[in-house]
Image (spheres, helix red, strand yellow):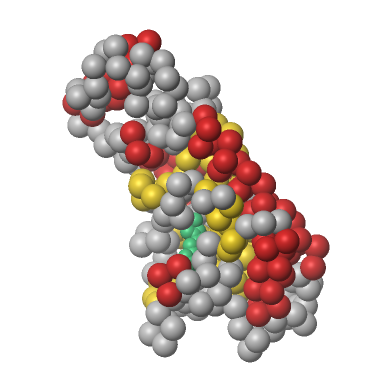
Amino acid sequence: MGSKIGRNDPCWCGSGIKYKKCHEEFDEKIAYIKSQGHEVPDHSIIKTPEQIEKIKESAKINIAVLDYVAENIRAGMSTEEIDRLVSEKTAELGGIPAPLNYQGYPKSVCTSVNEVVCHGIPSSDVILKDGDIINVDCSTIYNGYFSDSSRMFCIGDVSAEKRKLVDTVKECVEIGLKMVKPWGFLGDMGQAVNEHAIKNGYSVVREIGGHGVGLEFHEDPWVSYVSKAGEEMLMVPGMIFTIEPMVNMGTAKVFCDKKDNWTIYTADRKPSAQWEIMVLVTEDGNEVLAY
Ligand code: MF3
Ligand code: CO
């Protein structure tokens, strides 16, 4: 890393400062950690301060769209109506919903009810009813920059059992977030998330994870929540990724709907919950950009 750039050349980060006075030491530290056998980020996923500002603007819209959903979601509403709320609010704020047409995805948001783990497609046939839990997963493109976060909503009178699942997954994300700091590893976060879920008697989905985000919808690294401390990619300042564990009440096993090729269900049809935040690794810890 950094081997092709002269010490007096402008730094790769776009600061305009000479490499030797900017990221040379940083790159050497990363190269050393790599030589110890760790996976490390390359420059393409380390965001510049200018990029971070733009990504934050996108994230602000994503938060506002989810706030708007929170104000309006209710029993009796179809998930198709949630799609309309998301698409209208995003457009009003000058953004584009990232899911629409993404790899053929037909709607502007994912709405995953009860035993749907993720990627539920909004439909006029799916009516929210008292006792349902739903994940609404929003992603926004603004001026070419991407943001992504999701929240759970409890519709009316939700059983204590399902409510506990929803609350515990939120705690998993908060506990994982505490492990996000420069020069740690993604596995530090993943293990913390996993341990909290297991401790509460739940299981964590293995096949679907989080991801880098900002310049693209889905960038490296792929982020696991069944990983081990000290493993997976090194975290360095300027990286942005999601913490979005899918936690199941029963088995961790899931399957994809053969008819639509998107909707993921729990194998035992027991409930699943997910919260998603988008986090920036900073010089001294982290900053949540979207939630
Ligand atoms: N928003 C999801 C995520 O958290 C991705 C959904 S892909 C889509 O990564 F096409 F279904 F929108
Ligand atoms: Co995501």
Q: Looking at the image, which residue is at 56% across and 43% down?
A: 55
Q: Looking at the image, which residue is at 52% across and 66% down?
A: 99
Visible residue check, residue 171:
no
Where residue 275 appears, x then y in whole percent? Answer: 58, 55
Where residue 246 appears, x then y in whole percent? Answer: 49, 60
In the shown orientation, is residue 192 left or right of residue 10? right
Seen in the picture, residue 272 relative to 237 is either above or below; the reply is: below
Where, by quadrant of the figure, is residue 13 drawn?
top left
Q: Looking at the image, which residue is at 58% across and 57% down?
A: 140
Where residue 19 appears, x then y in whole percent? Answer: 33, 16
Along the line of sight, the residue nearer the viewer: 101 or 272: 101
In the shown orientation, is residue 171 left or right of residue 203? right
Along the line of sight, the residue nearer the viewer: 144 or 231: 144
- Give the total number of marks visible in the rendering: 0
Q: Looking at the image, which residue is at 34% across and 26% down?
A: 12
Seen in the picture, residue 131 relative to 151 is either above or below; the reply is: below
In the shown orientation, is residue 224 left or right of residue 118? left
The quarter in which the N terminus is drawn is: top left
Seen in the picture, residue 186 relative to 208 is either above or below; the reply is: above
